[in-house]
Image (tube, rainbow, N blue to C red):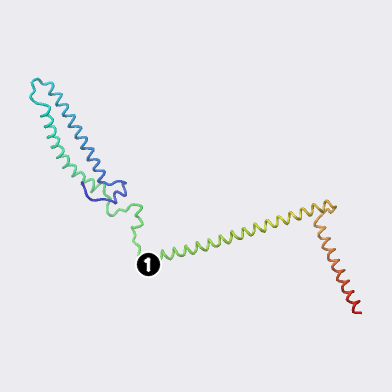
Amino acid sequence: MSVDPMTYEAQFFGFTPQTCMLRIYIAFQDYLFEVMQAVEQVILKKLDGIPDCDISPVQIRKCTEKFLCFMKGHFDNLFSKMEQLFLQLILRIPSNILLPEDKCKETPYSEEDFQHLQKEIEQLQEKYKTELGTKQALLAELEEQKIVQAKLKQTLTFFDELQNVGRDHGTSDFRESLVSLAQNSRKLQNIRDSVEKESKRLKIS
């Protein structure tokens, strides 16, 4: 049997070519033994039908074993040649062939190519960090918008409640009430300013 490990072929086939050939050899050898046993049984049956036969079963067994050794010697010789053909021409991957997972090794990279790839990796890392920071900023802004939206909702709910209170007290439009309240507030402020001016004038005089 071959002593070449043929690891690349084992990577492709999932088994070593030598293991395959060994199993074929064992299968052929078992078949040869079975054939010789069958032949021996046929010869013994034939001898039983011959009267006054001087050939004993022991002699038949010795002849069978001798013939088996002869056949096995020729078989080993033929199988050795067949094994060489199989391992060299059928179960061997040519040296110029690469497996799909090794295609990346087909084109060698120089130091300049490596530096270029390293630079690209660094640029991609920086881009990833920038995009990650932008994402975090957008998430923070989204949270702020949610807070503002919640406060706005509370404010609208408060105005709706005020409008309902105004309706209960005879005010039909809460917005008009706010406008009127603002106008009255300005009038009161003007009156207060006039009173303060008049009071100062009287103190001076």
Image quadrant where one finds the C terminus:
bottom right
Circle 1 packing at 10 Å, graded few (<14), some (14-19), many (20+), is few
Nearer to me, 95 or 37: 37
Identify which amino acid the numbered label 1 is placed on.
Answer: Glu
In the displayed structure, would residue 200 be above or below residue 17?
A: below
The residue wearing badge 1 is 112
Label 1 sits on a secondary structure element that is helix
**Image position, residue 53 (x, y; %):** 8, 23
- Number of numbered discs visible in the structure rendering: 1
Residue at 62 percent of width and 58 percent of height? 143
**Image position, residue 54 (x, y; %):** 7, 24
Residue at 34 percent of width and 58 percent of height? 105
In the displayed structure, would residue 187 be above or below residue 91?
A: below
Instruction: Give the image quarter of residue 27.
Output: top left
Residue at 19 percent of width and 32 percent of height? 35
Left or right of 177 on screen, residue 146: left
Left or right of 125 on screen, residue 73: left
**Image position, residue 119 (x, y; %):** 43, 66
Seen from this angle, which residue lies furthest front?
203
In the displayed structure, would residue 124 be above or below residue 43?
A: below
Seen from this angle, which residue lies furthest top?
51
